Image: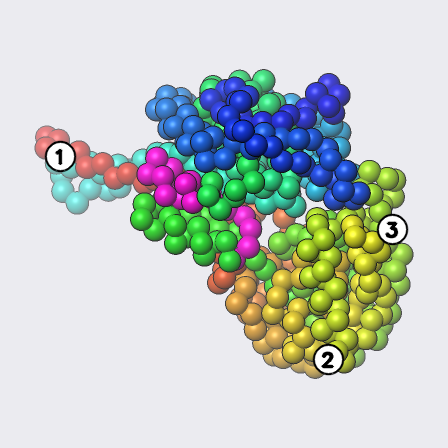
Amino acid sequence: MKTNDLIFDRSFVNGKWTNQGDETFEVTNPANGNSIQTVLDGGIQITEMAINAADRAFKSWRKTTAKYRGDILEKWNYLILKHAKELAEIMTLECGKPFSESKGEVAYGASYIKWFAEEGKRTYGDVIPPHSEDKRLVVIKQPVGVVAAITPWNFPLAMITRKVAPALAAGCTVVIRPTYESPLTALAIVYLSQIAGFPPGVINVIVGKDSAAMGKLLCESQKVKKISFTGSTRIGHILMAQSASTLKKLSLELGGNAPFIVFEDADIDKAVKGAIVSKFRNAGQTCVCVNRILVHEKVYDEFSVKLTKAVASLKVGDGMLANVNIGPMINIDAIEKTKEFVSDAISKGAKILTGGKPINQYFFEPTVIGNATREMSFSDDEIFGPLAPLYKFTSDEEAIKIANDTIYGLASYFYSENVSRCWRVAEALEYGMVGINEGLVSTEVAPFGGVKFSGHGREGSKYGIEDYLEIKYMCFGNII
């Protein structure tokens, strides 16, 4: 199968490619602005159609066995891995990340399908010792119903599979609304899901530019029982408010302000490598990217020199080219936001150690900023770009205080060779995830999610399927 065979131009509802919609929009390559595909905008109408299709399909899908559902998920996983190269090319074309990162995402995203294909068989209930001789108490778990998955542009495959694999394994049906910047990967994998054998209506993908109206309908529909959203905290607030009237379940993976702490006893070379992978993956455009690098004053100079040298060697360019480390920003607004962060920092005494400028309207130099202070705007705002600010600290207590001084609580990282310090700091950090001497923490076998204004709910691991299940208690009486 060629890459073009996996590029589609319209929504997929009830097992069919739909003709719904009068308008179109362009999906463009962020590396050069060229159009990749003209896509039919399904709008509100396609959203309603998808909800109804998923609701009808749920009535039969929920009755299937976990083994049956797992077998189809296994086939889907196989097909995604079989076409990893083609999917990675589509991903790089529409969201810009280097091809090697895209291939990594395909494998990472597929791992959730593989995991939950098995985990669906383990949604165990309980038999509770009764409170009287003539009663028997049983607890079972049942699928919550229709699930809407609203996903961002930066991980166009993994953000979908992390949500829909547990939903499908649990017996739910899904409506996927990918962002209009990168819908092509979603449409490609739903095509493969059809080949895998999912019945019509079980998986639906809707595409359109009016994300606010489409999201509002998903939130307010009584047929949709759960929303799973990855995106900004601002939009998370809106979706939560819009879902209040229907009291539906919500999983929200929202913004972050990840600290990366380098203690004086850290292995500096390992810390530099961890900072590079955690900060500059996808040009810094991930929700768990490092936002603030806190370095003990005793090792600040050594770390800053080594980090600056490593960052200066990163190759910027079109993600389809060989050996590229840093791809484009997603759009001109992202470029402008990064420029504003740099200008603000310089005006408040920061020093540019490397980078600091846009290369053109598509790319921004990977940048290290020294002498960062908490007064600079990126201390509170999510950077979402290839910009690494360095702060000094003098004690463990100060580092923890600075790290926790944010409304966000998604991911955090620190480097230390002291086991006692590792335990104390990890327990003190107010984050849903902590990387200890490690810059990459995401895996299908561990729970992914945050606290505070970074949202609630967990994806992946044995915990990831629980949000797609309802607990039902059954009391059998008069058993004599």
Residue at the location (61% across, 75% down)? Answer: 402
Residue 27 seen in render: yes
Of the two numbered discs 2 and 3 on the same chain, state the one appearing first in sequence: 3
Whole-Å distance between the Cαs marked 1 and 3? Answer: 70 Å
Check disc 2 and report the residue beneath it. Answer: 348
Residue 80 at what x, y percent from top left? 65, 27
| Image depth: mark 1 or mark 3 in front | 3
Q: Position of residue 56 (x, y in %)?
A: 37, 24
Which of these two is toward me, 450 or 176?
176
Frontmost residue, 31 versus 376: 31
Residue type marked 2 = Lys
Is residue 446 one of those drawn in magenta? no
Q: Which residue is mark 3?
A: 315
Residue at the location (58% across, 18% down)?
A: 195
Quadrant in the rendering for residue 313: bottom right
Residue 140 appears left or right of 254 = left
Disc 1 on helix, strand or loop?
loop
Residue 353 is marked as none
Up-down: is 64 above or below 184?
above
From the image, which quarter does the C terminus lie in? top left
| Residue displayed at 39% across by 54% down | 241
Per the model, the C-alpha gap separating discs 2 and 3 is: 29 Å
Residue type marked 1? Gly
Give residue 125's position: percent from left, percent from top: 34, 37
Residue behind mark 1: 477
Callout 1 crowding tier (Cα within 10 Å): few <14, some 14–19, many ≥20: few
Tell me the magenta residue range. Answer: 215-233
Q: Hey, which quadrant is residue 201 in on the image?
A: top left
Q: Position of residue 36 (x, y in %)?
A: 73, 33
299 relative to 166, above or below: below
Secondary structure at badge 3 equals loop
